[in-house]
Amino acid sequence: RVATLEAAPQLSLQAQPALAEEVLLAGIKVPSLEEDFGYEAAEMLSDLVMGQTLAVRVEMREKSETKRGHDNVLVTIYDPATPTTPSVNAALVQAGVARCVRPRNRRIGTVVDALKPYQETARASRANLWQYGDVDSDDEM
């Protein structure tokens, strides 16, 4: 006996929207891996997010200055199960492995204002980036 097989419908992955999107943490500047404390920042970020169920709040989208036709998506990552726990953004700032940026607009200004107390804690305790005092940068708050 011979069975007939019907052709399965074709699925084009190109027609499907992306399931993951590259994002930037809103309101903070994290050193690159080549810079001082870059590795520590990457390791801490990994520890904070890997294997966790977290929520992402999109703070804003802006045109990328380096990637033509691409938007930067600025986000805050947080644990919705424990709303009193600082966001991932705030935890990185408080540990002194990231710092607040100078806000370019009101939306990010609100995010940065919420992160400033965490930066002051890191600065006062001379944590990581702050070990020698104030970080001298145009991006610094």
Image (spheres, rainbow, N blue to C red):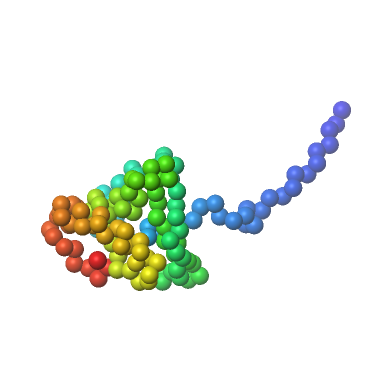
88 above or below 64?
above
- Above or below, 43 relative to 63: above
Q: Name the residue at the right extreme.
A: 1
The image quadrant where one finds the C terminus is: bottom left
Q: Position of residue 54 (x, y in %)?
A: 43, 45
Asked if one can make out residue 72 in the rendered structure from this viewpoint, the answer is yes
Residue closer to the observer: 21 or 6: 21
Q: Quadrant of residue 64?
A: bottom left
Q: Is residue 16 left or right of residue 54?
A: right
| Front residue of 57 and 46 | 57
On-image quarter of the N terminus: top right
Count of labels shown?
Answer: 0
Can see residue 29?
A: no
Position of residue 92 relative to residue 60, above or below, is above
Which image quadrant is residue 26 in?
Answer: bottom left
Work out which residue is located at the far left of the displayed protein and give it. Answer: 132
List x then y, in percent, for residue 19: 54, 51
At horizontal 18% and vertical 67% (from top left) the residue drawn is 136
Q: Position of residue 15 (x, y in %)?
A: 64, 57
What is the residue that sits farthest to the top in this orientation? 1
Residue at 43 percent of width and 45 percent of height: 80
Q: x%, y% of residue 22?
A: 45, 57
Question: Could you tell me which residue is drawn at 38 percent across and 42 percent down?
Answer: 82
